[in-house]
Amino acid sequence: MALDKKSGYRKNFSLGVTFIVLISILFILSLFLAFNFSKKSIENEFVSEKVNVLEQSIKAYNDFFQNKMPEISYYNGFLDSATAAKFVDTVTIKYPFISKVTFYDTEVKNVAVKDGMNVGNLSIGPKSIYQFGKTVAPDSVKLFSEFDTRSFKVGDDFNAMAYKLVTFVDLLDTAAVPTQEELFTNFSVVKSNKITYLNIPRREDLKIYKDMMRRKLNPLPVYQQDMLVFQLDPNKIKVINTRPLLYQKIEVEPLTYDPIDTSDENMTTEIALPGAFSDFKLYFTSSKSYIKKEIFIYFMPIALVLLLVYGVLLLVAFLIYRNLNINSKMFKLQYDFVNNLTHEFKTPVSVIKIAGNNIKSATALSQKEQQLYGKILDEEADKLNGLMNKLLAFTQIENKAIKLNQEQVNIEDFIESTIESHTLKHPDFKITYEVVGFKTFITDPVLLGSLFDNLAENAYKYSKPAHKILHISAKLIKGVLVFRFADKGIGIPASELNNIFKKFFRIQNEYNQMGSVGLGLAFCKELVNFMQGEISVKSKVGNGTEFKIVLPYNSSK
């Protein structure tokens, strides 16, 4: 515990938990704010998007008013009832909101008329009047003819248009050219649900109209004018809902319309229709539950971005934690390595120093004492040399600094040599073996010997006194060599199996209390990898461990 507190890599779980809690709170708060933002945005759109609905819904009306209706002027006043009927048919089919059209076949004269308007010497009156439309009965098409003897009043629509004509002519500056906008404005009257249009005369005709107003011309001129009154039905406007997920219901209602149901569960807005429909409005209604769908459509991309950011922050936190964890383990492994390596060196050095001091301080040494001290110095020197050789060999193999020697090895002789070496060293160590399928193969005997020695030493070290048993098997299976080292030792916990081949790693148990560098199995793995093979392990605590080594089989150089 003292090491963890002093280490710069110690894991601060409270700091990590605090960080995760903070970003989680920020994430939840961000989601809440994002949802409120989405809700407010959709509510604002509910009010603003009605303009787009209006524009699309009155597109047909604008097309009729600006493009179709002025086509009447192309006839220059020479429309007859048949041509007018065909024109009206095309209009009512294309523009369903036109319910009825009244056609005035009109004349402008230099003499007074009975039915019409007389100003000075200028007179304007209808020769005949017709009405067309889907609701007009065939016997009601013709309303008036100049040859009728019955009295007839032309009506306010005609009089209003005639008044605009004579006023325009009276104020006309013959030296100036009127604009198309001036002409269009003065030759049309827009009222509620009704548009009156008089074909625009030519400029020369307007000059003559002005002259006719002042005096009698000789011969008396007569000019043809066509006037049409379009009756409009606002309920026949095709409402185009450009935001069906936003507006649940859109209706055409009078401007004075005020719904009885004013429940808080509904959202409403309205916008006035233009032109001839100015007494009406589009009325928009949506329930709040209906709008929620649109809110979530708006909210989900924002939520996904926030979730992505949150995930990235969690990933960063995890990577930082993992890095600290790995560094902490590496620091501890290195710390243990230095401690254990120091201990491994310190023990033989201390023994050598003691033996040396004894030799130096002794006045005389017997032959037996000389042999004892000589043996001690030789064994401890071998320990130091073996440790240095293992460290050097590990570094060389890891850095690919040595070459693989290829020699022919008799496997039975090789295993028996290994057994003899270890049983001489450890008389209580029982080693058996079997060889199946081959006798010789090509390999590096030094590296293979290091591999066998390390695994045999491990089997002896990590076995209880009564179970220091090792069985070595060497078999040729499907073109590869399979070596198995099975002992009856204490076994390896399953949680540690993935770590035992790592450098400086040591399993904490009673057998490692006296110090271990933690390079043995890591050295074995590097050896096997260098020899282009594979090493694996299976173990059960209390029953023993088996190491399996697979090497390529070469029968000749």
Image (cartoon, rainbow, N blue to C red):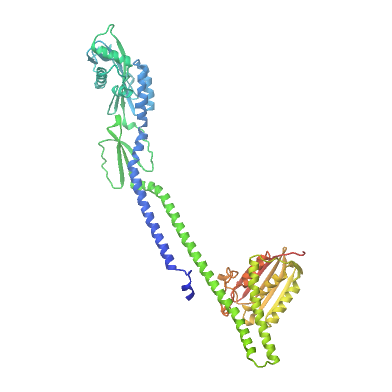
Q: Give left or right: position of 470 versus 8.
A: right
Looking at the image, is 260 positioned above or below residue 78?
below
Q: Position of residue 207 (x, y in %)?
A: 29, 14
Is residue 1 among what the camera can see?
no
Instruction: Tell me the quadrant of the picture where the C terminus can be found.
Output: bottom right
Count the labels in the image: 0
Using the image as rendered, state which of residue 336 and residue 384 is in the foreground: 384
Residue that extends furthest to the left in the rendered view of this protein: 120
The part of the image, by quadrant, that contains residue 519 is bottom right
Q: Give left or right: position of 161 versus 304.
A: left
Identify which residue is drawn at 38% across, 41% down. 244
Q: Position of residue 392 (x, y in %)?
A: 64, 71
Using the image as rendered, state which of residue 540 and residue 380 is in the foreground: 380
Using the image as rendered, state which of residue 21 and residue 349 is in the foreground: 349
Q: Position of residue 161 (x, y in %)?
A: 27, 21
The part of the image, by quadrant, that contains residue 337 is bottom right
The part of the image, by quadrant, that contains residue 360 is bottom right
Looking at the image, is 50 positioned above or below residue 409?
above
Using the image as rendered, state which of residue 93 and residue 198 is in the foreground: 198
Is residue 5 among what the camera can see?
yes
Q: Position of residue 43 (x, y in %)?
A: 33, 46
